[in-house]
Amino acid sequence: MTACVVLGHKYRFTAENEVLVWSCSRGCGAGGNKRYSSAADARRYAAAFDRPDSEDLGRNAPVLGMWPLRVWRAMTRSRRRRP
């Protein structure tokens, strides 16, 4: 799916007994699972991983959104290296 290629997958996490299951909510088919020793562990990890990214807004900015900052940093680094 094009959105996943451009923006990355948008995983959702759920617990099914001892198994943590994740899948892309955009419907591209990406996902997987992992078995834990107890259902409580699987539920705990699912709750921890399945939270909105809005709490980290700005920390995980997309590459295109950070492009001006990356260019500015590269220019200032190259100026510092010149004698």
Image: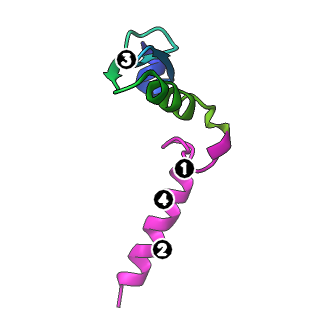
Residue 6 image offset from top left, x and y in percent: 45, 27
Seen in the picture, residue 48 relative to 9 is either above or below; the reply is below
Q: Are marks 3 and 2 in contact (CB under 8 Å)?
A: no
Q: In the rendered structure, which disc, 3 or 4, sits on the residue that comes first in sequence?
A: 3
Q: CA distance from mark 3 to mark 4?
A: 34 Å
User: Tag 1: residue type?
Assistant: Met
Dot placed on the residue nearer the N-terminal end, 3 or 2: 3
Residue 75 higher or lower than 54, as above or below: below
Residue sitting at x 52%, y 14%: 25
Q: Which numbered disc, 2 or 1, marks the residue that appears first in the sequence? A: 1
Mark sitting on residue 66: 1
43 to the left or right of 54: left
Q: Which residues are magenta?
A: 55-83
Circle 4 — which element? helix
Q: Which residue is mark 3?
A: 31
Q: Nearer the viewer, residue 39 or 80?
A: 39
The residue type indicated by label 3 comes to: Gly
- Which mark is in front, 1 or 3? 3
What is the secondary structure assignment of the residue under circle 2?
helix
Q: Nearer the viewer, mark 3 or mark 2?
A: 3
- Do labels 3 and 4 touch, CB within 8 Å? no
Q: Which residue is mark 4?
A: 71
Residue 78 in the image: state x and y as whole percent.
39, 74
What residue appears at the point 50 percent right and 21 percent down from the top-left corner?
13
Q: Nearer the viewer, mark 3 or mark 4?
A: 3
